Structures are given as structure tokens and as C-alpha cells.
Image: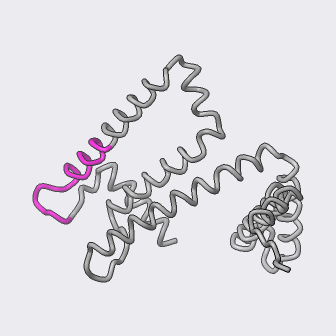
Amino acid sequence: MAINFNIGDIIQTLQNIGVYDYLLPFILIFAIIFAILEKTKILGTDKSNINAVVAFVVGFLLIVQQGIVATINNFLPRVSLIIIIFLMALLVIAMLAGKEYKGLQGTLFTFAAIISIIAIIIALSPDIGFSTYITSWGISEQDQETLLGIGILVFLLIIITIIITGKRKGTQNEPNKGGLLTKIDNMFNQGLKD
């Protein structure tokens, strides 16, 4: 007698009993809140039991709000896709570098961080109603695509211009201390050191 084993049926059963709508969001929020409380020590040192209770309560309060859970369930797969895309891009860059790749640094890191933030906002935008605001202004879908294309092009031109003109005339490697991109870059570098 053959056993009919189907992973799809198991996943569907887990979905039917609420694992994806209740258990996984609870575990995720509990872990994040607990880790933040342990790291920041807001409630005091050696207060793991109190941190766990607070994280437990926040996790349970969150899963009652199914709208927030739906947003999390839609947002996390999109961010995972963005992470996979960035990982593949870094693998290609490392392959083309031909030597030990130490990661993005300086202005390139700042540019990548800005693109990452924009990508995360775009991943979240359908759930926060960004597209509803645009269509309520009377802009058609075709116009939205055109404006998005022009906006991306203008944004890239601005970033390239800032990178090119952000250098001092006397030196090639020392960035202009007053440039906007340099200030943002210094802010990110300072944050990474902390």
C-alpha cells in the first residue's frame, strides 16, 4: 500500500488551522520585541523574565489585529524577494571583481542603502494605500508608469551628478565635506560603527 504524501496538503492544513495567521506572526513579533528589549535594556539589566512578558503581551495584542497581520504576511515575502535580488547582484559583482570582495563602501554603500529604503517602501506601499492616493488624484495607470519611469531617470541623474560633482577639484579620492551625499554617507558610516 503506497502512502500518498503531499507537502501542499500539509501547508494547506497549516493554513486552515491558523498557523500563518496567528502562530507565525506571534513568534516573529515576540522574537523581535524580546530581542530589542534585551539589547536596549530599557526595563533594566537582567530582566529577561519581564522582557519576555512584555514581548508576549505585545505579540498577542498584534495577532488580534488581523489587518496588521495581513500587512506583515504581504510585506515579508516582498522584502524576502528584494533581499534575494540584492544577494544575486552582490554575487555577480563579487564574481566580476576577481578578488576578495569586501562589500559596498563609501558613496556606493550610501547609494545602495537609499535604493534599499526605496525598495522597502515600494514593497509596503500597496498595503499602506499609496496606489489609492495616486489614483484618487486622477492619474491613469499609463501616466503612473510614465511618471515612474521619468522619476527613476531623474533620480539616477541627480545621484550621478552628486557623485561626480561631490569631489574636490584638487584631489580625486577626498570627497567634498559639504556635499549632501557625503553627509548621508558619514551618517551611515557613523551608524555602522555604533
Q: Is residue 172 magenta?
A: yes
Q: Tell me which residue sits at (69%, 73%) in the image.
A: 39
Give above or below for 34 relative to 107: below
* 58 on left or right of 142: right
Task: Name which quarter of the figure residue 80 lies in.
Answer: bottom right
The image shows residue 69 at horizontal and vertical percentages of 77, 50
Magenta part of the protein: which range? 156-173
* 29 on left or right of 173: right
Q: Nearer the viewer, residue 44 or 16?
A: 16
The image shows residue 75 at horizontal and vertical percentages of 64, 51
Q: Nearer the viewer, residue 83 or 56?
A: 83
Looking at the image, the residue that sits furthest to the top is 138
Looking at the image, the residue that sits furthest to the front is 1
* 143 on left or right of 70: left
Looking at the image, the residue that sits furthest to the bottom is 100
Q: Tell me which residue sits at (71%, 52%) in the image.
A: 73
Q: Nearer the viewer, residue 8 or 121?
A: 8
* 117 on left or right of 59: left
Q: Tell me which residue sits at (76%, 46%) in the image.
A: 68
Task: Name which quarter of the figure residue 23 lies in.
Answer: bottom right
The image shows residue 1 at horizontal and vertical percentages of 86, 80
Colour pattern of the rendering: one colour
Q: Is residue 102 magenta?
A: no
Q: Nearer the viewer, residue 43 or 79?
A: 79
